[in-house]
Image (cartoon, helix red, strand yellow):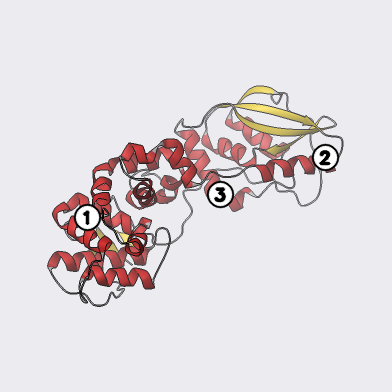
Amino acid sequence: MKITHAGLRLPEQKRGPHRSATPKDTHMKHSNIAALPQAHPFIHEGIVRLNPAQAGAVLRDHGYEKNRDVERAQKHVDVLTETMRRGLWLPRDQIAFADIGGRLIMVNGHHRMAAQAASGVDIEWSVVIYPCKSEADVAALYARFDTNVRKRTDENVMSAMGVSTILGVTPTIARAVWRAAPTLAINMVASKKDDDYLSRHIADDRLAVVQSYAPEAKAFQKAFANAHLKASKRMLSGSVTAVAMVTFRARPELAAPFWKGMAENDGLRRGDPRATLLQWLQDNSMRGLSAPTIYATVRAWNAFCEGKELTIIRMASTPLRIAGTSYVVSL
């Protein structure tokens, strides 16, 4: 989905972010531990400051055959790279090597080395080296790192950052606005082609977007004061909430009855755009950021603003302006 105004973009197609000059992955097809060079002198246990060239050398000369392919996780590497470039990376994060006969094999830190090599930034690492007697020991060590590392969920990040407290709303509303943030963040990283992906994964960016919509989040919560459970659940996806934030900012006097009426769903008559949108959401339940869901929500909002009935929501290729705003969306 396309948008012609900076500030809200609907997903057009899945595109990878701008590709940095990330070194090619050294994903080895056969065991070649015996062929690995002796450890570089700059790699030792303790605090080690690496420059990008050294990070590239680590990736090239001490990669492990079982490491996951960087090419398959390019977006993740790009996010790490961007974080490093902005100075947001915390120093002394741990990377680990297995030592088998003086030859070092990186068993934890593969993607981070690829990111640093592309970042152009010097970074301090906490290096740990584990002695191993055999290739089986190396494999067991690698597996332990691979299975014990668990990615933080949105809930973990939101809780740690205190998003609900910062916004002054319930965790339920905070979660909805957090999910909407990538759609609202098109200008957050102007140099990237896939800004919504970056804002989704760089917590500082996402929090900044969420904070900027604190008044709208509170107004949205007020509309849910007497919400019908089934209706409210369908309204709290990132897609619908993104439109809610924009409408509360542009036309609060109309946004309040629109969203309150939907949330309560107290005898909405047939033809009421709010009732029609609720039915559409029930029939086309989609999680996350969905272009059709945003388009359908805008259709209902526009009809409501114009005082028109709406009995069915059809998708169309015609660009659609969000009433009261300068945003124009299209499928």
Badge 1: few (under 14), some or many (20 or more) residues near its Cα, within 10 Å? Answer: many
Numbered badge on residue 115: none
Real-space CA distance between mark 1 and mark 2, rounded to the nearest whole angstrom:
58 Å
Amino acid type of the residue that numbered disc 3 sits on in the rendered structure: Gln
Image quadrant in which the N terminus is located: bottom left
Of discs 2 and 3, which sits in the foreground?
2
Question: For mark 2, what is the residue?
Answer: 137
Which residue is at a point 44% across and 50% down the rendered structure image? 197
Left-right relation of 137 to 127: right
> Of marks 1 and 3, which one's residue comes earlier in the chain?
3
Out of 227 and 199, give the one closest to the viewer. Answer: 227
Question: For mark 3, what is the residue?
Answer: 74
Question: For mark 1, what is the residue?
Answer: 247
Which residue is at a point 32% across and 64% down the rendered structure image? 231
Secondary structure under tag 1 reads helix
Real-space CA distance between mark 2 and mark 3, rounded to the nearest whole angstrom:
29 Å
> Of marks 2 and 3, which one's residue comes earlier in the chain?
3
Secondary structure under tag 3 reads helix
Circles 2 and 3, Cβ within 8 Å, touching? The answer is no
Q: Is residue 212 something one can see in this rendering?
A: yes
**Quadrant of the image occupied by residue 253:** bottom left
Q: Is residue 1 something one can see in this rendering?
A: no
Amino acid type of the residue that numbered disc 2 sits on in the rendered structure: Asp
Where is residue 210? Give x, y as percent: 33, 43
Where is residue 319? Give x, y as percent: 25, 67
Image quadrant in which the C terminus is located: bottom left
